[in-house]
Amino acid sequence: MKLGIDEVRKILNKLPEGQRKTIENIISGEVIDQVICGGCGRVVAEVYKDGRIEPKVDGRGKMWLLATRHRLDGYLGFQCLCGNDSRLSEQEKGVKGIEENHVTKKDIEKVLGRVSSKPSEYKLENGEQNIDNFIIKKL
């Protein structure tokens, strides 16, 4: 069954504003990825085609995404309210300046050396990429 634009608008208008905006952004191609926490299974964020990351709010008005970070291995890291945290790559863990947020040039050189000798590899399979227990799902 094919729906015309008028039928789609009627359906969307019946939804709560947050859900309606999400679906409109997906349909229009503005939202390209969903971020799903592997710890609790919730969709915690959406990634827009301009690179913007917007946290999702659940039906009770609770936001589960606490933080995001561009990691030095080239991937995005996320922190969920459930405790799941991928903000540090394996190569960054144990580097005191990175973990304590007092980064020096030496810290960056150390991490980049680790990244070049053992780069992170997260395969994209069936439109999904699991990065340290956060799933980036292509829409």
Image (cartoon, rainbow, N blue to C red):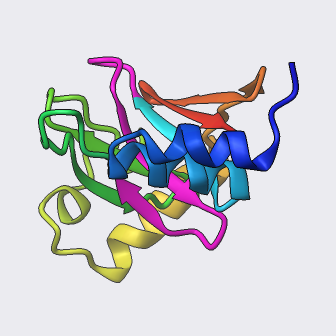
For residue 17, side relative to residue 29 (left or right): left
Q: Nearer the viewer, residue 116 or 33?
A: 33
- The magenta stretch spans which residues? 37-55
- x then y, percent, for residue 90: 41, 38
Q: What residue sits 46% from the left and 70% below the top?
A: 109
Q: Is residue 93 among what the camera can see?
A: no
- x then y, percent, for residue 79: 25, 43
Judge whether residue 58 is colored magenta.
Answer: no
Q: What residue sits 53% from the left and 44% below the top?
A: 12
Q: What residue sits 28% from the left and 79% below the top?
A: 104
For residue 21, side relative to residue 59 (left or right): right
Total tally of numbered discs in the picture: 0
Placement of the C terminus among the 4 image quadrants: top right
Q: Is residue 123 among what the camera can see?
A: yes
Judge whether residue 43 is colored magenta.
Answer: yes
- x then y, percent, for residue 49: 66, 65
- x then y, percent, for residue 13: 47, 47
